[in-house]
Amino acid sequence: LRYVNCQKHVFAECDRNDLYSFYRNVQCVLRISPKSVIIRVILQYYPRHFTSTRAIHYPISIGVSELIVLINDVKAINPNKTFNFHSTFSSSYNHIIGDKLNNMEVKFWDAYISYFYSFKNFYIQNKNDQQVIQEITTSLQLLENEDSMLISASPGDLVAAKYENDGLWYRAKILNIEENNFTVKFIDYGNSELSSNIKILPSKIACYHAMAYHCMLDDVDHEEYIISIENDIYDIIFNFLGSIEVIVTFLNNEETYLVNMKWDNRCIKTFVNNIISFGITPKTYETLKEIDQSGAKMIVNLIYTQSINEFYVETENSKEIQNKIEHILENEINWEPLTEYKIGKMAIAKSLTDNRWYRVRILMVHDGGECTCYLIDYGVQDKCSEFFEAVGYLKLASPFIKLCSLHIPTIKKKKKLFESLSKSFIDEMEQYKHKKMTIIIVETGEPCVVELYIDDFNVAKLIEPIPVIVFNVIHMNVLTVQVNSPGRRTVMNELSTIKTLNPVEKPKYCNIYGALVNNQWYRAELKNKFKGSMDVILVDMGSSIVNVKKLFQLPKHIQSVKYLTLRCSLGLDERYFCLYKLKLLCNSETEFMMIVFKNNNVDGHLIHLFFNDEDVTTIIKKH
């Protein structure tokens, strides 16, 4: 460190990689330049000497972060001399709190949830850090018999603090001090607690970055609301998340980190929805996984479609299971009353709607002995009363209708896209609901993830977004789309390289020819003949009609390529959306991804368009 001036204000300069901590009676103001860290040290004025042998951790405010540094000894201050300061560890508070992810190539972690407050406020630990965390914890327990209590402490100090629940020592940051009680945050776990016992943190342990990373789940407003009002659901999720290893995907590079999480190859939100909607607790989920085998193939009938992630089918042996369950429910009466009412509990209960007995899972407990329940064999919710234990076949038999989720691995499940795909799926299933279908189980459990086939055609392929070009935008709800298939793209590329074609003397209706329009070749179908000219349909350009004088013979492989144009509607109100913006966007070259969510061959198919993964309705909306 080199002192530049020495009156009442002393300036010190050090390399960015060598960060130090100053004594308790030293105030510091810091700024960071591209190549160095500039620290302004405001000292008591000593004309010749400033000495001490005792070092205390001191946090230095630098805007949104803090710096923790350490100096062992300071001797005489002289503006004309250079002093060697020994650093026993180096760490900024940013470093202590956790590594930034913007320099990381890997944005996927195997991780543990170290503390859970809510879906928008929880902490994770990298699985790869577990050995270091264990070493830190083991080392800190040696402090129990050491006399290293802090004489003074301030909010922001990094210390060793005892966690009163287990009596162990952990690294912590002081948040607040009231008399002899300290509110601390355990930086390797994330939770904040009261602690009356704090000690000096050994420098060899302080050098590690914080092992807890502050995170929030993406798109969890509904789930966050549910756990804020339902304590029982919160407790189930709290205990579940604290006991599993998850795969975390980071969606940004700054804390608080926006993340997605998976367990057992499924999104955590799926398990939350299982609990909320179906009463499927993690324990029940493990039981349901044993019912089917991955790869099993079944012939099914469609019962009901709610969304891509929730549809119900009846298998070939469903009727046999149904008859046996209903016989037991109607004829056996010697059941044991239910003694434990909790979310996810399976029971026999009477519906308040029709006074019939059903197998249920409890979703919500009300006053007066009533509960909101999920009817296991019918896929609906209802209020029930008179609860009894489910035993024997009633407990072990699989549901006689199967709850399924469609396997669509190639689709990005963004919220708006998912909503459109679900509408498309519901519409397609309505058209084929009386046909036999085939499912192949991809992942067991409930819902079981399946591939669904109709006449050997994969339904996921049927509803997936289609690349299209939009032509002839007359109105929001009157436009033509051209499927931009690989075949069409190949045809357009080959036509752009052709110099000449042979003219056709007597073109015939319904045949495909070449037409030269504005010095560009197109495929064309004859529509009308006139004296000296013809109206033709440009089959690859949204069925646009143009007038030409001649048609030309195309190579057979170009002539035979299939094409498809559709009359479509966006289903939008022009009072709220700008037709001019839509026309600018649809310039005969822009490619969109289209989802048909309502088939209508008379008035035009109802569609949803996406441009570069963005919903077109957001682009053309009036401000």
Image (cartoon, helix red, strand yellow):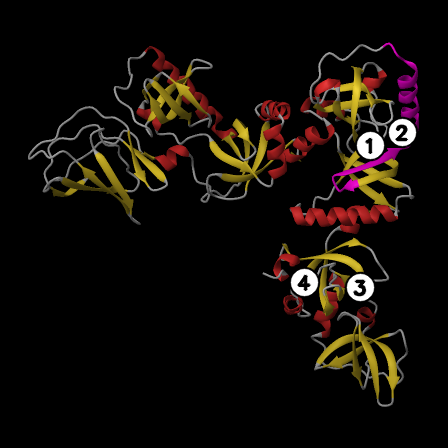
Mark found first going from the N terminus, 1 or 2: 2
Disc 4 on helix, strand or loop?
Answer: loop
Residue labelled with disc 4: 575
What's the CA distance linking mark 3 and mark 4? 25 Å
Question: Element under label 1?
Answer: strand
Instruction: Find disc 3 in the rendering and name its residue.
Output: 566
| Tag 2: amino acid | Ser
Sequence-first disc among 1 and 3? 1
State if disc 2 and disc 1 touch (CB < 8 Å). Answer: yes
Residue 326 on the magenta span? yes
Q: Which mark is residue 402?
A: 1
Q: Position of residue 187 (x, y in %)?
A: 42, 28
The correct choice, above or below, for 439 with respect to 394 in the image is below
Residue 217 vs residue 316: left or right?
left
Vertical comparison of 140 with 568: above or below: above
Q: Position of residue 572 (x, y in %)?
A: 71, 59
How far apart marks 2 and 4 lie (CA) works out to 50 Å
Lower sequence index among marks 1 and 4: 1
Badge 3 marks a residue whose secondary structure is: strand
Distance (Cα) linking label 1 and label 3: 36 Å
The magenta segment is 306-334
Q: Quadrant of residue 11?
A: top left
